[in-house]
Amino acid sequence: MLVIVDEAYIEFARDTKIFNSLAKPLSDTRVISLRTFSKAYGLAGLRIGYGVMAPEIADILHRIRQPFNVNALAQTAAAAALEDEGHLEKSLEIIHKGVGFLQNELTAMGLETYPTQANFFLVDVKTDAAQVFEALLKYGVIVRAMGSYGFKTCLRVNAGLETENVRFIAALKKVLA
């Protein structure tokens, strides 16, 4: 049996109590930690990430992976991203500021937001979120209705650039009016 630790959003975490498998690695060789360059590093289109695991597990996975599954451009971009700490810090600053702004604005509108350690969060819009999602599309704003997860009145909202965050709030106010 293997235990997979998915840490796709770990760079966004501000809570120092959040488990970080690379900061405090487990000695159990059955644990595999997975990370991605898609989120905080902004390389989603390149489909690149990495796993930290025991050499014997890596050897098995290497034998069964498809050939040329990660291209040279993606590998070069990922290596450059690891070197560019300034870009990562700036990205995290923008996202953290954006999450704070959005949650404050939504709370001021009387809506409940839920805590997050990622670049997105849930907001309860107190009505059918699927209808709100559809209405927001008419303003060019894309969020995700969470009905398929059992949260019929919640939207998943990603923080973006300041102009995008302001646009979302303005559109949501019109939709909910």
Image: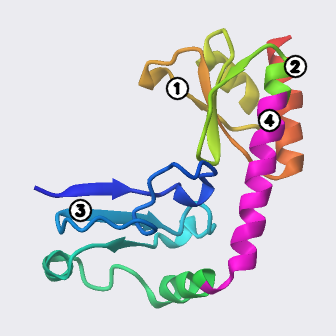
At x 68% / y 82%, what residue is drawn?
A: 84
Label 1 or label 4, whichever lies nearer to me, is 4
> In x, y percent, where is residue 29?
18, 69
- Neighbour tally class for label 2: few under 14, some 14-19, many 20 plus, Cα within 10 Å: few
Q: What residue do we see at 74% from left, 52% from top? A: 95
Under circle 3, the secondary element is strand
Is the residue marked by circle 1 packed among few (<14), some (14-19), or many (20+) residues within 10 Å? Answer: many
Q: Which labelled disc corresponds to residue 174? A: 2
| Viewport quadrant of the N terminus | bottom left
Residue bounds of the magenta highlight: 83-104
Q: Are marks 2 and 4 in contact (CB under 8 Å)?
A: no
Q: Amino acid at mark 2?
A: Lys
Which mark is drawn over residue 146? 1
Task: Give the mark toward the camera: 3 or 2.
Answer: 3
Q: Amino acid at mark 3?
A: Val
Position above or below: 5 against 72: above
* Of callouts 1 and 3, the N-terminal one: 3
How many labels sit on residues? 4
| Residue 152 image point, x, y percent | 53, 15
Q: Is tag 2's residue or tag 4's residue first in the polypeptide sequence? A: 4
Distance (Cα) linking label 4 and label 3? 36 Å
Q: Amino acid at mark 4?
A: Leu
Q: CA distance from mark 1 to mark 4?
A: 18 Å
Report if the CB atoms under discs 1 and 2 are less than 8 Å apart: no
Q: CA distance from mark 1 to mark 2?
A: 21 Å
Q: Which residue position holds label 4?
A: 102
Queried whether the magenta region covers residue 101, the answer comes back as: yes
Residue annotated with mark 3: 31
Q: What is the quadrant of residue 35 in the picture?
A: bottom left
Q: Nearer the viewer, mark 4 or mark 3?
A: 3
